[in-house]
Image (cartoon, rainbow, N blue to C red):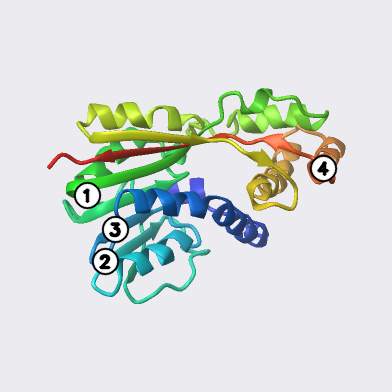
Amino acid sequence: MAEERYSTDAGEEDIERVRLSMLAAACDPKTFALLERVGIGPGMHVLELGAGAGTVSAWMAEQVGPDGRVMSTDIDLQFHEDMPDNVIVRQHDVENETLPAAHFDIVHARAVLQHVPSRAEVIEKLLAALKPGGWLVLEDGQFMGFGEQSLPEPYATIHKIIASGSMNEWHDPNYGLHILGRLRELGCTDLDVIGEVWAMRPGEAGGEWWFLALERAFPRLVEVGMVTQEDADTALAQVREPGFAMISTTSIATIGRKPV
């Protein structure tokens, strides 16, 4: 079931809450710039898919004002913060549940589609939820090459395992490469792509979102015998050493407009 794929195991809530805050600190300014670029403004109806803690939804609420509406959805709302009055919060499974047709001026999703098995069909569903002339803003990743960078052992070997996404066969860590083509197939106009990499360092939001994910993943790797506990402990110490830096994944933001 979808809820099982995206759930947080008992005992991991605190790590995940901090990880989401780090992800927001690292990524929200770039997301806000993208949404400003497509013209978010007063009175609009917008959708934030996979809202997480809701930081983007809260910012959207300020931009659309009291006459606008934000629908903030996630399959798991346990980390979603309280929202302003013009935000509608919904627990929603985008694969299996409907969205209102031709309703939104902007639909945004960040780091969502790579985790959705029927991702190509979901993009079509998101496009159908847009008004004519509305904007899709879809941020996703490219992990290709991320696992091949030079890193100290044993972290280098462990990093290759995790970066491949091989623990979940339904996960596509490189789906950011395919969104532009999908929007082209669906007839979107005004297509554009913005990509970025950065240095990931301990103690900085741009790195901690990943290092905290390692803390969650390592016990599973140890449990199934892919990694020893000693190597896992050493790897975590390596990525938290002062001065450590590594290259991030490639963040790919794809923008497209629904034909009028």
Q: Which mark is residue 129?
A: 1
What residue sits 23% from the left and 66% below the top?
Answer: 43
Q: Which residue is mark 3?
A: 46
Q: Earlier in the sequence, mark 1 or mark 3?
A: 3
Q: State left or right for residue 198 relative to residue 63.
A: right
Image height check: is 173 above or below 70? above
Q: Residue 243 bears which disc, if any?
A: 4
Q: Nearer the viewer, mark 4 or mark 3?
A: 4
Distance in Å between CA atoms under marks 1 and 4: 46 Å
Q: Amino acid at mark 1?
A: Ala
- Which of marks 4 and 1 precedes in the sequence? 1
Q: Position of residue 254 (x, y in %)?
A: 37, 37
Quadrant for the C terminus in the image? top left
Rounded to the nearest whole Å, what is the CA distance between mark 2 and mark 1?
19 Å
Q: Residues within 10 Å of mark 4 (few under 14, many from 20)?
A: few
Mark 2 — residue? 42
Give the percent coordinates (x, y) of residue 192: 34, 34
Between tags 3 and 2, which lies in front? 2
Q: Give the residue at x 75% y 32%.
A: 225
Using a 10 Å C-alpha cutoff, classify the residue at mark 1 as few (fewer than 14 neighbours), some (14 to 19) or many (20 or more).
many
* Amino acid on which disc 4 is placed: Gly
Dot 3 falls on a residue whose secondary structure is: strand
- First of labels 2, 1 by sequence position: 2
Tell me where residue 201 sits by quadrant. top right
Choose the circle earlier in sequence order: 4 or 3.
Answer: 3
